[in-house]
Amino acid sequence: MTVIKLTTQAYCKMLLHAAKYPHCAVNGLLVAENQKRKDGQPVLCVDCVPLFHGTLALAPMMEIALTLIDTWCKENKYVIAGYYQANERIKETRPNQFAEKVAARIAENFSEAALIMVDNSNISMGCYDPAISVFEHHDNKWKCRDASIDCCEDWSEAQKIMSALLEDRSYDSLIDFDNHLDDLRNDWTNPEINKSILHLC
Amino acid sequence: MASVSDMYDVTWEEMRDKLRKWREENYRNSEQIVEVGEELIQEHASKLGDDIWIIYEQVMIAALDCSRDDLATTCLHELKKQFQGSHRVKRLAGMRLEALERYDEAFKMYNDILQDDSTNTAARKRKIAILKAQGKSTEAIRELNEYLEQFVGDQEAWHELAELYINEHDYAKAAFSLEELMMTNPHNHLYCEQYAEVKYTQGGIENLELSRKYFAQALKLNNRNMRALFGLYMSASHIGASPKASAKVKKDNVKYAAWAASQINRAYQLAGHGTKETKCSLKAVEEMLESMQIMPS
């Protein structure tokens, strides 16, 4: 079974999204480079596109986002490789029906798609533990992967940078697709945050 | 630690006015409210006059959101001193207990209020909020329905109910709740648009047609609602391509979708004026619309 890993940029933007809207559920997509992989090579999610906050379980805007981001991916030689969701309640870490549906739809196009649930209780300034659980598709069910498997390409780098971003309150300037729909000038690729992360690396 | 007034070069009056704006428009930017409000209370309390009490309340609730129990307790203390025996203050004390996850004590506090005054809607709604926080969605929905039988005009409650139903994937009941809202607020484009989204999610040709109509209605009420525009495009496209639609219906919907596509392109072009960044969005949108173009059959 292919392993999914996240780059620092993907991991940080995902958690910044959750941190920006602590009182809401949030969700988004993860993208990987579209290239042939050798057997056993992990799928590396290089970027994250934050989508919505608040009421997530409605179809039309999700469909628009998937189609639009799919088009963007093709232009940048990426592929949509995963879906993440942070639930509204801190103790709820299981994916709901909507999450599973979206992840299944992504898996139709990319068989090794992952469903990532953000573990809200593990988000802290110190970032001691990775705050995510990775679910993989086995026999038509989404099963949680062993937590001991490293989810980040470079965890110590991700940890350091995430901590710095939270201190800086960088999440204030994170743009998700909802923000984009509110004002089209808002850029959901978050170039400024990407620059900050690169700078901190 | 630099003060807010130094960092942003604002006067205390501007800070007070900002807090009022956030209060009136029901923003939940708690971190900012705590930052601005705490400084206002600490440095300028004497200048605020009677405004200070409502500011204490606003800052206290924001402090609970940010786990600042110290600040919340200070505000609560001042309010208790000033308004002894007040139900409104008691509800705030209950909210603090909720923030500390002492739900049983909070529940008791709200029940005390209700014993004294059975029509106290704030206490009833907090009880429902506790159920929601505990993950007891079915009970929360049941209690909220009971509440709405008595307080039929409470829009905030109808909206909360709609969202609870959506989270439970019970789209039919969510639609019903939104219908109540649309009846009493026919000019609110947001309710129209959300109703259309629920209908679309339910699926099936009839729901898609209804969804298209309501997206169109939302657009009529506010022609800058991008979600309504995108929604109109998606629903019309799906109907136009559906084997279950009659030839005339398909033809009409292909036209609506084409119109929506041109409006979407126009909106992106207007937004992209001058900025390099949005050019990538514009290109992606153009390509997406092209690739989804429905061939009239």
Image: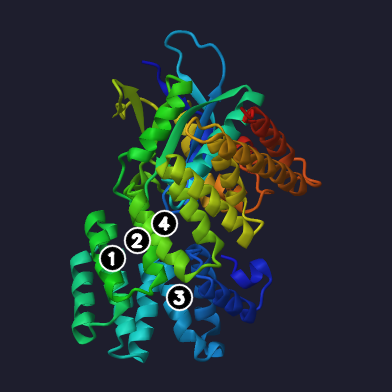
Q: Do residues under tags 2 and 3 come within 8 Å of each other at their CB atoms?
A: no
Q: Do residues under tags 2 and 1 come within 8 Å of each other at their CB atoms?
A: yes
Q: Which numbered marker is on residue B58? A: 3
Q: Is A53 rendered above or below residue B2?
A: above
Q: Residues within 10 Å of mark 1 (few under 14, many from 20)?
A: many
Q: Do residues under tags 4 and 2 come within 8 Å of each other at their CB atoms?
A: no
Name the residue carrying label 4.
Answer: A23
Which element is circle 2 on?
A: helix
Q: Nearer the viewer, residue B56 or B192?
A: B192
Question: Which residue type does callout 1 highlight?
Answer: Leu
Q: Residues within 10 Å of mark 4 (few under 14, many from 20)?
A: some
How far apart are the two marked residues, 3 and 4, measured between alpha carbons? Answer: 17 Å
Q: Residues within 10 Å of mark 2 (few under 14, many from 20)?
A: many
Of the two numbered discs 1 and 3 in the rendering, the one whose residue sits closer to the viewer: 1
Left or right, A90 with reference to B222: left
Q: Residue at x 51, y 85 (%)?
A: B45
- Give the chain of mark 2: B
Name the residue carrying label 1.
Answer: B144
How far apart are the two marked residues, 1 and 4, measured between alpha carbons? Answer: 20 Å
How far apart are the two marked residues, 2 and 1, measured between alpha carbons? Answer: 7 Å
Q: Residue at x 52, y 91 (%)?
A: B49
